[in-house]
């Protein structure tokens, strides 16, 4: 009898451990994004236009694009009764490790082409950037570098698999306003060979109006400050 009681007690302890472990796993916090860094307000020392072949070539940039789709998703566990609809976007092309190997490559000059079928629409743009030692006569060593993009109508910007942001704090990588530029600091003191993977999520808007126009990538520049 004592042996049976001991087995029951051991089983109860083991079950409790597994139960609490499963709760801990289920409640594991999502890693916090890096905090936003505010870009300089002064004019840049040097600017590269990434929407030209010469500018993109200087940074070894190869642009790719793909439309993002709205797909059905499973409602969250905390959803109140009656809320059974949930949606997501696919692909999540800003995340680290994402492969765009099957995406079409576009010329830098074609970034400005009007894309999407209009209404509620989302377009991804991706490229890698490699900082050279010099661009023309400009020495890049030690410069602060800011990526400036302007998408008609909104954009979110991912850098190396992260979208820097914080609640209640100006976050340049997130939506800035209707046809307003995003200016995202890539590095405070870059050196030749530094690499940045960029993913720009273009959004047609205002979303609640479902406009009969398209996503338009209007500006992509790299600003250097010394």
Image: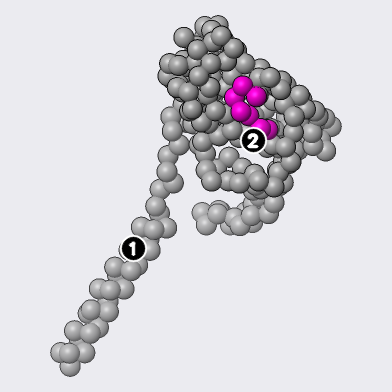
Is 165 displayed left or right of 4 in the figure? right
Residue 38 percent location from the top left of the image: 47, 19
Q: Which residue is mark 1?
A: 21
- Seen at 54% across and 46% down, the residue is 97
Check the image and report above or below for 29 versus 142.
below
Q: Which residue is mark 2?
A: 126
- Seen at 53% across and 16% down, the residue is 134
- Seen at 53% across and 22% down, the residue is 132
The answer to whether residue 58 is magenta is: yes
Mark 2: few, some, or many residues within 10 Å (few <14, many ≥20)?
many
Using the image as rendered, state which of residue 108 and residue 158 is in the foreground. Answer: 108
The answer to whether residue 216 of the structure is visible from this angle is: no
The answer to whether residue 164 of the structure is visible from this angle is: yes
Residue farthest along the left direction in this orientation: 2
Mark 1: few, some, or many residues within 10 Å (few <14, many ≥20)?
few
Is 216 displayed left or right of 182 in the figure? right
| CA distance for labels 1 and 2 | 39 Å
Task: Tell me which segment is drawn in magenta.
Answer: 57-63
Residue 221 percent location from the top left of the image: 63, 19
- Seen at 63% across and 29% down, the residue is 61
Using the image as rendered, state which of residue 87 and residue 49 is in the foreground. Answer: 49
């Amino acid at each position: 009898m004592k042996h049976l009681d001991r087995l029951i007690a051991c089983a109860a302890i083991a079950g409790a451990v597994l139960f609490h472990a499963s709760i801990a796993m289920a409640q594991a916090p999502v890693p916090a994004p890096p905090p936003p860094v505010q870009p300089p307000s002064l004019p840049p020392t040097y600017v590269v236009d990434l929407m030209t072949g010469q500018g993109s070539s200087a940074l070894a940039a190869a642009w790719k694009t793909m439309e993002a789709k709205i797909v059905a998703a499973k409602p969250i566990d905390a959803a109140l009764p009656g809320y059974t609809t949930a949606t997501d976007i696919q692909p999540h092309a800003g995340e680290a490790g994402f492969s765009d190997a099957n995406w079409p490559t576009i010329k830098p000059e074609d970034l400005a082409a009007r894309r999407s079928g209009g209404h509620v629409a989302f377009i991804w743009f991706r490229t890698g950037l490699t900082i050279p030692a010099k661009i023309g006569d400009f020495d890049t060593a030690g410069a602060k570098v800011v990526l400036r993009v302007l998408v008609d109508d909104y954009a979110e910007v991912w850098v190396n698999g992260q979208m820097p942001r914080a609640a209640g704090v100006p976050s340049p990588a997130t939506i800035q306003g209707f046809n307003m530029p995003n200016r995202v600091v890539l590095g405070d003191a870059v050196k030749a060979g530094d690499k940045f993977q960029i993913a720009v999520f273009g959004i047609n808007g205002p979303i609640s109006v479902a406009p009969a126009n398209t996503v338009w990538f209007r500006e992509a520049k790299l600003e250097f400050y010394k």
